[in-house]
Image (spheres, helix red, strand yellow):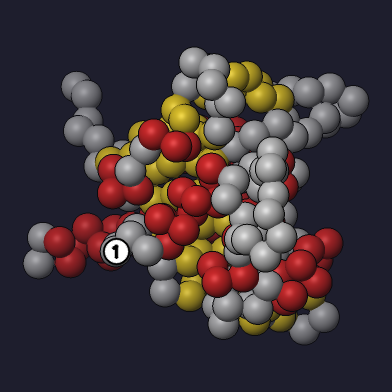
Amino acid sequence: MATKSKGKIGVLIEEHFDGTEFRRFNEYFPTQGYEVEYISHLWGNESLQFGSNPENDTIEEHVTVTTEVENINPDDYKGIICIGAYAMDRLRYQVNVTKGQKNNAPAVVFLRQAVATENLKLGTICHSLWLFCADSDLLKDRQVTCAHNIICDVENAGAEIIYDGDVTADLVIDGNLITGKHPGVVDLFMDAFVKEIEKVNALSFA
């Protein structure tokens, strides 16, 4: 007997995404009742295929994306996650730039909309705060964690990184933003992300 979906979790993705996170998202979220929909900028194509970072010299994961980030409404999702590795850096790309103008890559424009959407949970893990770093207004004064590689980027964007001794914290929740350190804590991150969504669901039925 089919179980009614609790809603969609949108995952922003591009080439060189983290394979571990991809596999676990596909395994875990459906067991909790949530559909996973992969989203990207398709550059006028009906679909694009992206590959993960190589593991053991092999690109082990591929995903075909048909959902264009310019054509969706954040209100249609329970949560939006930026997948880790280098995918979010690619989604910051702009064909044309103007001095003094904020980044207007389609994924960044969508992220601004998502941040402003009431009750929408946002998640990042490992390097994926890079997309938030494209506009410091998205990170200013937020408490977060991230991979050690991008500490300077995140701090320069105005966020406060939370530490656990001499390493960044495994998980930080600041309002609607849930951040995880790296793929090694993906299970902790996903569990917290679903719990934060469920809090909103509980309030909706209260």
Q: Determine the residue positioned at 78% across, 63% down.
A: 150
- Please provide percent x and percent y for residue 99: 71, 60
Residue sitting nearer the eye, 12 or 157: 157
Residue sitting nearer the eye, 107 or 204: 107
Give SS at disc 1: loop
Where 175 falls versus 189 (above or below)?
below
Counting the numbered discs, the total is: 1
Determine crowd level at label 1: few under 14, some 14-19, many 20+ residues with C-alpha closer than 10 A.
Answer: few
Q: Residue furthest right?
A: 57
Q: Quadrant of the C terminus?
A: bottom left
Q: Residue furthest top?
A: 46
Q: Quadrant of the N terminus?
A: top left
- Please provide percent x and percent y for residue 140: 58, 78
Where 81 falls versus 197 (above or below)?
above
Where 54 falls versus 49 (above or below)?
below
Residue sitting nearer the eye, 181 or 82: 82
Q: Note whether residue 195 is visible.
A: no
- Please provide percent x and percent y for residue 20: 67, 39
Indicate left or right for 20 with 199 as reference. right
Name which residue type carries label 1: Glu
Q: Determine the residue positioned at 71% across, 70% down.
A: 154
Judging by the rendered image, the residue that carries numbered circle 1 is: 118
Where 40 falls versus 89 (above or below)?
above
Dividing the picture into quarters, in which one does residue 148 lie?
A: bottom right
Indicate left or right for 19 with 187 as reference. right
Q: Determine the residue positioned at 63% across, 77% down.
A: 159
- Please provide percent x and percent y for residue 27: 50, 34
Indicate left or right for 192 with 18 as reference. left
Q: Note whether residue 58 is visible.
A: yes
Residue sitting nearer the eye, 196 or 38: 38
Q: Determine the residue positioned at 10% across, 60% down.
A: 205
